[in-house]
């Protein structure tokens, strides 16, 4: 049986998501019958122990584990110029 989190936890989750610039509507957290909290986001689902789910989830959120993959920009790639680093010689002069 899956049940919703208590209202205080749901509000805490929504506040964390808003503070991190994410849409609370794109995440769902539920308590499972095996006492794991299942969190589903745009990029997947994770399961956390009930007693530490919020701390672990917030760490994963901070590391962008739940963010959607951003595709590379379309169009031609700009060539990168090679930078030549200057090294300072023993006499204070520069050499390449």
Image (tube, rainbow, N blue to C red):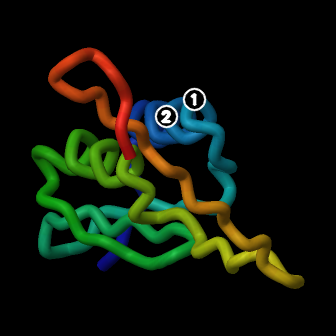
78 versus 90 height, above or below: below
Residue at the (15%, 53%) spot, across then down:
50
Q: Is residue 44 left or right of residue 71?
A: left
Give whichever of 18, 95 is nearer the camera: 95
> Disc 1 on helix, strand or loop?
helix
Give whichever of 93, 50 is nearer the camera: 93
Q: Position of residue 46 (x, y in %)?
A: 31, 71
Asked whether the residues under the numbered discs 2 and 1 touch, taking CB atoms below 8 Å apart as contact, a structural biologist would say: yes
Give whichever of 56, 78 is nearer the camera: 78
Give whichever of 14, 9 is nearer the camera: 14
Count residues near mark 2 (Cα–Cα under 10 Å), then give few for <14, some for 14-19, many for 20+. some
Residue at the (49%, 50%) spot, across then down:
84
Say which residue label 1 marks.
Answer: 19
Count residues near mark 1 (Cα–Cα under 10 Å), then give few for <14, some for 14-19, many for 20+. few
What count of labels does the image hold? 2
Specify the farthest residue to the top: 92
Residue at the (57%, 29%) spot, across then down:
19
Q: Position of residue 37 (x, y in %)?
A: 26, 62
53 versus 70 height, above or below: above
Say which residue label 2 marks.
Answer: 16
């Amino acid at each position: 049986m899956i049940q919703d989190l208590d209202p205080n936890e749901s509000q805490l989750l929504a506040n964390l998501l808003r503070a991190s610039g994410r849409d609370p509507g794109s995440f769902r957290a539920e308590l499972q019958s095996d006492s794991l909290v299942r969190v589903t986001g745009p990029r997947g689902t994770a399961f956390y122990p009930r007693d530490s789910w919020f701390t672990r989830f917030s760490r994963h959120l901070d590391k962008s584990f739940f963010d959607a993959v951003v595709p590379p920009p379309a169009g031609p790639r700009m060539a990168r110029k090679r930078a030549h680093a200057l090294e300072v010689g023993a006499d204070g002069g520069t050499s390449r």
